[in-house]
Image (cartoon, rainbow, N blue to C red):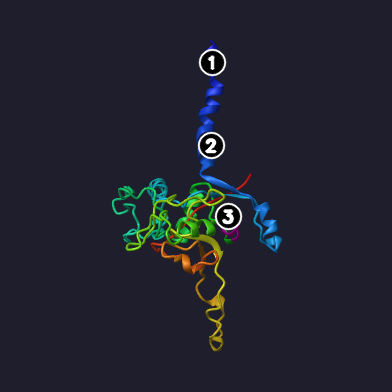
Amino acid sequence: MKFFRYIPVLLIVIICIPIAAAADDMVLVPVEDLAVIVDDPGDIPAPFFIDRYEVTNAEFAAFLRDVAPNTEEPWRTWINGEDPNFKIDVESESFDVMVGFDTFPVVTVTLEGAARYAEWAGKSLPTNAQWDAAAILGDSLTSWLEANSEGSTESPCDPEEPGPVPVGSYSPDDLGLFDMIGNVWEWTTDEYETEYLSFMPTLGLSPAAGPSLSVVRGGGFLLDPGDITEYPAAAASPTSRFGNIGFRCVRETD
């Protein structure tokens, strides 16, 4: 009968193992430390966790396997299955990842597709402020520049055939985050502010009249270390399905 005394303990251990593993995939961003860095306290987001790595082909394939057979939503519009940079088999709907590409960041996914994945995973996409906070506090730019400096042997990227590399190929930043700079651009939920129609006042148009653009962060595999002096930011149409845009997720603290 003594065995049964240990059943609750065993259950606790068994239950806690996957929880601990899941927590290890995310990093708590110490946003309170931003108070000594930023001028405006309004720029400091609430505490949050952020994915240690960009979402991989294997993770996105698991999402498609679970979602695609049970939904009438146009999941095919979330991806570009015909782009050679997309490494998941959607033609047969087996959602198998091409051999050797499981740990590469998933690309050619729209903002909507990334958001649906995040919701499915119990997370969300980062705001621009959240992405900034994680990158600044991790000193991600310094880590990336050191890894890609002239004479560095750490970079796994082939200069003759540039492209994404498996997540975690470079050393982590000070927070333990990988690939915040380089590898692929990452979606955020913020709209990119632009005045690209300001030169057409005679048509009665305003910037709001044009298509909205979303902020992407981090740069991609084509970044030249010699040209980078600050954290990269750019604009992309939310429906873009480019081979150099991926994403990572965040989760609010309880």
Question: Which is more foreground, mark 3 or mark 2?
Answer: 3
With respect to residue 180, does 12 lie above or below? above
For the image, the number of numbered tags is 3
Could you tell which of marks 3 and 2 lies nearer the N-terminus? Answer: 2
Q: Amino acid at mark 3?
A: Ala
- For the residues labelled 3 and 2, the Cα–Cα distance comes to 21 Å
Q: In the drawing, does residue 163 fall left or right of residue 211?
A: left
Give residue 134's mark: 3
Q: Which residue is mark 2?
A: 20
> Dividing the image into 4 quarters, which one contains the C terminus?
top right
Question: Which is more foreground, mark 1 or mark 2?
Answer: 2
**Magenta extent:** 129-139
Q: Amino acid at mark 2?
A: Ala
Q: Which residue is mark 1?
A: 4
> Could you say where residue 119 lies in the image, as x and y percent from the top left?
51, 50
> Could you say where residue 156 lies in the image, as x and y percent from the top left?
38, 54
Q: In the drawing, does residue 98 fall left or right of residue 58?
A: left
* 162 is within the stretch colored magenta: no
Q: Residue at x 56, y 16 (%)?
A: 5
* 136 is within the stretch colored magenta: yes
Q: Amino acid at mark 1?
A: Phe
Front position in the image: 137 or 85: 137
- For the residues labelled 1 and 2, the Cα–Cα distance comes to 25 Å
Q: Secondary structure at mark 3?
A: helix
> Could you say where residue 167 lies in the image, as x and y percent from the top left?
43, 51
> Could you say where residue 63 lies in the image, as x and y percent from the top left?
42, 48
Q: In the drawing, does residue 172 fall left or right of residue 161?
A: right
